[in-house]
C-alpha cells in the first residue's frame, strides 16, 4: 500500500478534508489519562499497586486544542475521551466527537477541560476489553494519550495486546470479523503532562514551566517578609521522585540550600547547612531560603522533612524560622506562554506521528530537546525513568542525575558551582585576573540574573569582578568599580538592569575605552545585551588591529526582548516579554467574549524581528501575526479580513490580530485598524492596542532567571579557560577570532561562536539573523487559526530517536 507522509498530506490538503476513507487514518481520539494506572513495585519495599489520585498540569488544554484542530485539518474525525481511561472503559457519552469550536478559549485554562480520573478497571483484562470494544464500534484506531509514565505504560500494553483483545471480542460476539479487520491495529502516541518533569527523554514536560511560575510567585512574596523580619524560610515543592522543580527554583531564587532526591546531601549535612546559613548572614544577608523537594532524603534513604530542617535551624542557630508547603497550588493557575507553545507543538507533532505510523512502528512519545520536537520510543523512556528510581534506591546518585538527562545535569552542575563551597575562604583565593561586566542596549528582565551569576562564578574562580555602569559610555568614562558577592544578593528576581544600560556603541569612544581597559587592568569582558551588544563586540574586535589593549577575551550574552541576536535561538528577557504579551492578550480576549463581534489589533515590540508576535500568536490563539520576515500584501490582508468575517458566523465571535512593530513601513498598526474597521462594518468592530514598554518591564520569569544564571556561569568558565590559553610571557594577548564569541542556545545546547563568523548570517540593516528557527512554527499558527492550504516546511522531520544511546545502559551498577 502506498503511504503518504503526514506533512505531504497537510501540504496537499485541499478539498477532500472530510473524507473518512483515507488510508492514512480512520478516527483519532484524544485521551486524557493523567493517572498512574499500573501497579508499580517501589524498589526496596514489598510489591504493591500504586494508584494515586488523578493529576493535571497547566498546558494540557493547549495540547488538546492543537491535536483536535490539526487532526480535523488533515481530514480525521477527532473524539474526546472524557475522564481518562475510565471514560474509555465506560464509553457512551464519555467518548464524543470534537469540533473546531469546542476547543476555543481553552489556551488560558489550567487543568484539563475533558477531565481525568483514576481507573482501576483499565488495569483488568475485562476493562481493557470494554475499552477496545468501544473504540472498535466507533472506528477509532489512533490514540493520543497525555499523561505520566504510568498512563503511557498502560497505553502501550493496550496497544501490545490489541490483536488478542479483538480476537476475544469476536469470540464473545461483541464485534464482527469485518469490524475487527477495519480496526486491525492501534496506533499510540504519547505526550507527557507532569509538573514534576520526571519523565526521561524530554527537557520539559507539559506543565512544568507553569508550576515554576506558581512557585516563584510564592517565593518572591515570601522573601520580602523574610527580609523584613530577618527570617529563614523553608519551602517544600512537589517532586516525590524528581527534584527538578526544587533544583530550578533554587537557581531561580538564589536559595542557600536545596534538597533533592536524586542527590542527597553528604554525611554531616546538618553542620554544613548551618555553616552556610551563618556565612550568608555574616556577609550582610537578612534572610535565608532553603528549598526542599517533597521526596528529599539522606544518603541512607531516610526522608528529610521540613520540620526536621526547621527544628535544626531554629534550635542550633536560634534563627527565626518558618516553613511552607506549597502543595497543589503548583498544579493550578493559568498556563505560562512556554507551556502553551510546548503543548501546541507537541499536539501537532503527535498528530503527524499518528498519521505516519504503521503497524510496525513502536509506540512513541513526543518530546522536547532544546528547541526541537523529537520522537522517542515510549517504552525506552519509561524504562530509563524507572532506572532513575532503581539508581536512587541502590545509592548510585550520580547515575540518577545522569539518567535524568542533559537539562537536569546542566542545572545540577550550575547549582554545584555556586553552592557546594563548604568554606567561604575558598571564594577569595585570588589569581589576579579582572573580569568586567557591562550591560548594553535596552534593559530586559533576566539581565540582573546573568550579572549575579557571572559575578559569583568569577569570585569562586578567584577572579576580581568589575562592574561597568551605563554601557559602553560608562566604559569610556571610567564608571568602573569592583563588585562583590554581597552586592549582587537578591538580583536574580529583579527586572531591568541594576548596572544601567545604554544603546550607544563603542566606536566613537574606542580610544578612551582602550585607555580605561589598560587603566583598570581589565583582562576580559562580558557584554550582556541585545543587538547593540553584538555590534559593540564586533567593533571592539575590529579595533584590535589598532588598539592592543582590546586584545582580551570577550563574550556576548544575548539579552533582549526582541530575541534578534545572531548565534542564539533564545535571548534572556524574551520569555518574560512573551508572558507579558500573552497575559495581556488573555485579558483582551476575555473582554471581547462579553461584547462579541470584536477584533483586537495589537502591536508588539521586536523591531524587525517577528519572534514576539509569532510566539505570542501561538500562545494566545491569534488569527494572524504580521511580521517583517514574512512579507504580506493587500491580497493577504483581504484574505485575513474575509477569514474573520466567516469566523463571526460561528460561535467564536472574536478576533485577535498581532503585528510586529516594524512589520511593514506602509501597513502600519493604524492602517490595519482602519482597514479592518472599514471592511468589517456591520459584521465586527475593532480596537487597537500598542503594548509599548510594558514588555520590557516586570520581574523575570523562572525561565529567564534560570537561563541567565546558566549563561552567566558558563561565560565565566569559558573566559577562565580562554585566559589560560592567552597568557604568555606574563601578559594576556588574545586576537584570534575564537577569543571573542557569542554564547547562545543552538537547537540542543549552549555553544560559543566567534563574533566574526556570524557576520554572514546577519542582516545588519534590519538587525536580525538571516536564519530564524521559529519561522518554521508559523504554519502551526495558521493551521490552528483555520486557514486553508498552509504549507509546512518539511526540511526537518522529527524522526524516531533513541534515548538509551543518550543516557547509557545500566549494567552492573554502572552507566
Image: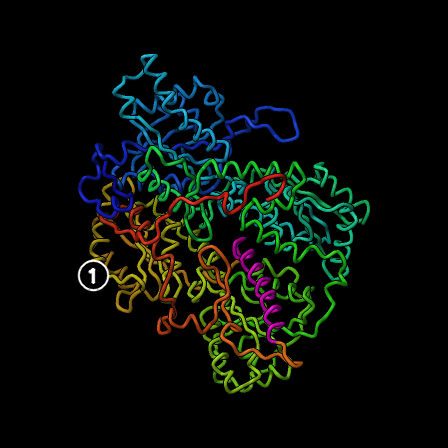
Of 669 and 136, nearer the camera is 136
* Name of the residue lying farthest toward the left: 15
Residue on which disc 1 sits: 634
Residue placed most toward the observer, 366 or 592: 366
**Image coordinates for residue 592, horizontal then vertical, percent:** 34, 47
Colour style of the rendered protein structure: rainbow
Q: Which residues are magenta?
A: 700-726
State whether residue 236 appears in this view: no
Q: Position of residue 746 (x, y in %)?
A: 45, 59
Q: Is residue 565 left or right of residue 666?
A: right
Q: In which quadrant will I find the C terminus?
A: top right
Question: At x 65% / y 81%, what residue is drawn?
Answer: 729
Q: Which corner quadrant of the image does residue 512 belong to? A: bottom right
**623 versus 436 height, above or below:** above
Quadrant for the N terminus, please.
Answer: top left
Residue 728 is situated, as x and y percent measured from the top left of the image, at 63, 79
Dominant SS of magenta comes to helix
Q: Badge 1, how many Cα within 10 Å: few under 14, some, many 20+?
A: few
Q: Is residue 721 magenta?
A: yes
Residue 716 in sight here: yes
Please identify the residue farthest to the top as the structure is shown: 172
Q: Position of residue 755 (x, y in %)?
A: 46, 72
Q: Look at the picture and state if 438 lies above or below 86.
A: below
In the displayed structure image, the side of residue 496 where residue 301 appears, left or right: right
Amino acid at each position: 500500500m502506498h503511504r503518504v507522509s503526514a506533512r505531504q498530506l497537510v501540504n496537499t490538503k485541499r478539498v477532500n478534508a472530510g473524507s473518512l476513507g483515507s488510508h492514512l487514518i480512520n478516527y483519532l481520539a484524544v485521551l486524557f489519562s493523567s493517572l498512574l494506572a499500573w501497579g508499580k513495585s517501589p524498589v526496596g519495599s514489598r510489591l504493591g499497586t500504586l494508584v494515586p489520585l488523578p493529576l493535571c498540569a497547566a498546558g494540557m488544554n493547549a495540547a488538546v486544542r492543537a491535536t483536535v484542530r490539526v487532526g480535523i485539518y488533515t481530514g480525521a474525525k477527532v473524539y474526546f475521551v472524557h475522564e481518562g481511561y475510565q471514560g474509555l472503559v465506560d464509553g457512551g457519552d464519555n467518548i464524543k466527537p470534537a469540533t473546531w469550536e469546542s476547543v476555543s478559549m481553552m489556551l488560558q485554562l489550567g487543568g484539563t477541560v475533558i477531565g481525568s480520573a483514576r481507573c482501576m478497571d483499565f488495569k483488568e483484562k475485562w476493562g481493557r476489553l470494554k475499552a477496545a470494544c468501544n473504540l472498535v464500534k466507533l472506528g477509532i484506531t489512533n490514540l493520543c494519550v497525555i499523561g505520566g509514565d504510568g498512563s503511557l505504560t498502560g497505553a502501550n500494553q493496550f496497544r501490545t495486546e490489541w490483536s488478542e483483545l479483538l480476537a476475544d471480542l469476536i469470540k464473545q460476539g461483541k464485534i464482527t470479523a469485518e469490524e475487527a479487520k477495519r480496526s486491525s491495529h492501534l496506533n499510540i502516541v504519547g505526550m507527557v503532562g507532569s509538573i514534576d518533569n520526571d519523565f526521561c527523554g524530554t527537557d520539559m514536560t507539559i506543565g512544568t514551566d507553569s508550576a515554576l511560575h506558581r512557585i516563584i510567585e510564592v517565593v518572591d512574596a515570601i522573601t520580602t517578609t523574610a527580609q523584613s523580619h530577618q527570617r529563614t524560610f523553608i519551602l517544600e515543592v512537589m517532586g516525590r521522585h524528581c527534584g527538578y522543580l526544587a533544583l530550578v527554583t533554587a537557581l531561580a531564587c538564589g536559595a542557600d540550600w536545596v534538597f533533592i532526591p536524586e542527590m542527597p546531601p553528604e554525611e554531616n549535612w546538618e553542620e554544613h547547612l548551618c555553616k552556610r546559613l551563618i556565612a550568608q548572614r555574616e556577609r550582610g544577608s537578612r534572610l535565608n531560603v532553603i528549598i526542599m523537594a517533597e521526596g528529599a532524603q539522606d544518603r541512607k534513604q531516610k526522608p528529610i522533612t521540613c520540620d526536621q530542617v526547621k527544628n535544626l535551624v531554629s534550635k542550633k542557630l536560634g534563627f527565626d524560622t518558618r516553613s511552607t508547603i506549597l502543595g497543589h497550588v503548583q498544579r493550578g493557575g493559568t498556563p505560562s506562554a512556554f507551556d502553551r507553545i510546548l503543548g501546541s507543538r507537541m499536539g501537532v507533532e503527535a498528530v503527524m506521528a499518528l498519521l505516519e505510523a504503521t503497524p510496525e512502528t513502536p509506540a512513541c512519545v513526543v518530546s522536547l530537546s532544546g528547541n526541537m520536537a523529537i520522537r522517542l520510543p515510549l517504552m525506552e523512556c519509561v524504562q530509563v525513568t524507572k532506572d532513575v528510581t532503581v539508581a536512587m534506591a541502590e545509592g548510585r546518585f550520580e547515575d540518577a542525575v545522569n539518567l535524568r538527562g542533559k537539562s537536569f545535569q546542566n542545572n545540577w552542575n550550575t547549582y554545584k558551582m555556586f553552592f557546594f563551597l563548604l568554606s567561604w575562604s575558598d571564594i577569595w583565593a585570588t589569581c589576579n585576573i579582572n573580569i568586567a561586566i557591562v550591560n548594553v542596549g535596552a534593559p530586559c528582565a533576566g539581565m540582573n540574573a546573568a550579572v549575579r551569576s557571572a559575578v559569583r562564578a568569577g569570585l569562586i574562580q578567584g577572579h576580581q569582578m568589575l562592574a561597568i555602569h551605563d554601557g559602553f559610555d560608562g566604559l569610556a568614562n571610567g564608571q568602573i568599580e569592583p563588585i562583590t558577592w554581597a552586592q549582587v544578593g537578591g538580583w536574580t528576581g529583579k527586572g531591568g538592569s541594576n548596572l544601567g544600560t545604554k544603546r550607544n556603541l563603542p566606536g566613537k569612544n574606542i580610544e578612551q575605552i582602550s585607555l580605561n581597559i589598560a587603566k583598570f587592568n581589565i583582562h576580559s569582558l562580558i557584554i550582556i545585551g541585545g543587538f547593540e551588544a553584538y555590534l559593540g563586540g564586533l567593533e571592539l574586535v575590529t579595533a584590535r588591529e589598532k588598539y592592543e589593549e582590546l586584545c582580551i577575551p570577550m563574550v556576548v550574552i544575548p539579552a533582549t526582548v526582541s530575541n534578534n541576536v545572531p548565534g542564539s535561538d533564545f535571548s534572556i528577557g524574551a520569555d518574560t516579554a512573551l508572558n507579558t504579551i500573552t497575559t495581556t492578550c488573555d485579558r483582551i480576549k476575555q473582554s471581547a467574549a462579553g461584547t462579541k463581534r470584536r477584533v483586537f489589533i495589537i502591536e508588539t515590540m521586536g523591531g524587525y524581528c517577528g519572534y514576539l508576535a509569532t510566539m505570542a500568536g501561538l500562545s494566545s490563539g491569534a488569527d494572524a501575526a504580521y511580521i517583517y520576515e514574512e512579507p504580506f500584501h493587500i491580497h493577504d490582508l483581504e484574505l485575513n479580513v474575509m477569514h474573520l468575517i466567516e469566523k463571526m458566523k460561528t460561535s467564536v465571535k472574536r478576533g485577535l490580530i498581532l503585528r510586529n512593530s516594524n512589520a511593514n513601513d506602509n501597513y502600519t498598526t493604524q492602517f490595519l485598524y482602519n482597514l479592518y474597521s472599514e471592511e468589517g462594518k456591520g459584521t465586527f468592530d475593532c480596537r487597537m492596542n500598542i503594548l509599548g514598554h510594558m514588555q520590557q518591564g516586570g520581574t523575570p520569569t523562572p525561565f529567564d532567571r534560570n537561563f541567565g544564571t546558566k549563561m552567566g556561569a558558563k561565560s565565566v568558565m569559558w573566559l577562565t579557560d580562554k585566559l589560560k590559553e592567552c597568557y604568555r610571557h606574563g601578559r594576556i594577548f588574545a586576537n584570534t577570532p575564537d577569543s571573542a564569541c557569542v554564547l547562545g542556545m543552538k537547537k540542543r545546547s549552549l555553544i560559543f561562536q566567534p563574533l566574526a563568523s556570524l557576520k554572514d548570517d546577519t542582516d545588519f540593516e534590519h538587525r536580525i539573523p538571516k536564519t530564524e528557527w521559529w519561522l518554521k512554527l508559523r504554519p502551526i499558527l495558521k493551521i490552528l487559526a483555520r486557514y486553508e492550504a498552509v504549507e509546512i516546511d518539511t526540511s526537518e522531520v522529527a524522526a524516531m530517536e533513541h534515548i538509551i544511546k543518550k543516557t547509557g545502559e545500566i549494567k552492573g551498577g554502572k552507566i
